[in-house]
Amino acid sequence: MLIQTRTIVVEKGNSDKVVERFSKEGLLDGREGLIDISVMVNKRSKENEEVVVLIRWESEEAWKAWEKSPEHIQGHRNNKGSTPPEYVISTTVNMYEVKKIRSGQFVRDTE
């Protein structure tokens, strides 16, 4: 499994805009190998707000297939030269290879 995180730091009062953007259905949703997308807000941040988007893929190959897809490439072409909204302070993207998953005794659906 491969996990991509996108951490977006925004000015106070703007996290809902980022949550809304990443909560909408899009081309990624029907992609083979996509497990799920979680959108989270850091409740402990005092000066700014932080939104973390966690995208889980079945494998690195599934993620690479998305990265090389015509839809993904066209999306980047469409956004080329555009600037992020003024309220976005920073964005950091990381990739993690999952080595081990341990489930608790009581697992429930969080939706």
Image: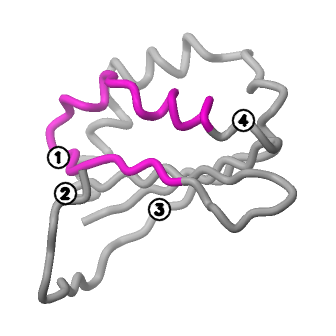
Q: Quadrant of residue 72?
A: top left
Amino acid carrying mark 1 in the image = Gly
Give the mark nearer the N terminus: 1 vs 2: 1
User: Disc 2 marks which residue?
Assistant: 58
Q: Earlier in the sequence, mark 2 or mark 4?
A: 4
| Mark 2 neighbour class, 10 Å CA radius: few under 14, some 14 to 19, many 20 or more | some
Question: Dot 1, how many residues are within 10 Å of its Cα: few (below 14), some (14-19), or many (20+)?
Answer: some
Circles 1 and 2: CB atoms closer than 8 Å: yes
Q: Residues within 10 Å of mark 3 (few under 14, many from 20)?
A: some
Residue name at image x 24 percent, y 66 percent: 1
Point out the residue furthest to the top here: 78
Rounded to the nearest angstrom, the CA distance separating label 3 from label 1 is 16 Å
Measured in 3D between alpha carbons, the distance from the residue under mark 4 to the one under mark 3, in whole angstroms, is 25 Å
Return the x and y of residue 16 as percentages of the image width and height.
60, 35
Is label 3 in a helix, a strand or a loop? strand
Q: Secondary structure at mark 4?
A: loop
The residue that mark 1 highlights is 33
Q: Percent position (x, y) of residue 3?
A: 37, 61
Magenta span of residues? 16-40
Q: Is residue 95 toward the left or the right of residue 41 in the image?
A: left
Which kind of residue does numbered mark 3 sit on? Met
Neighbour class for label 4 at 10 Å: few (<14), some, many (≥20)? some
Q: Which residue is mark 4?
A: 14
The residue carrying mark 3 is: 95
Secondary element at tag 2: loop
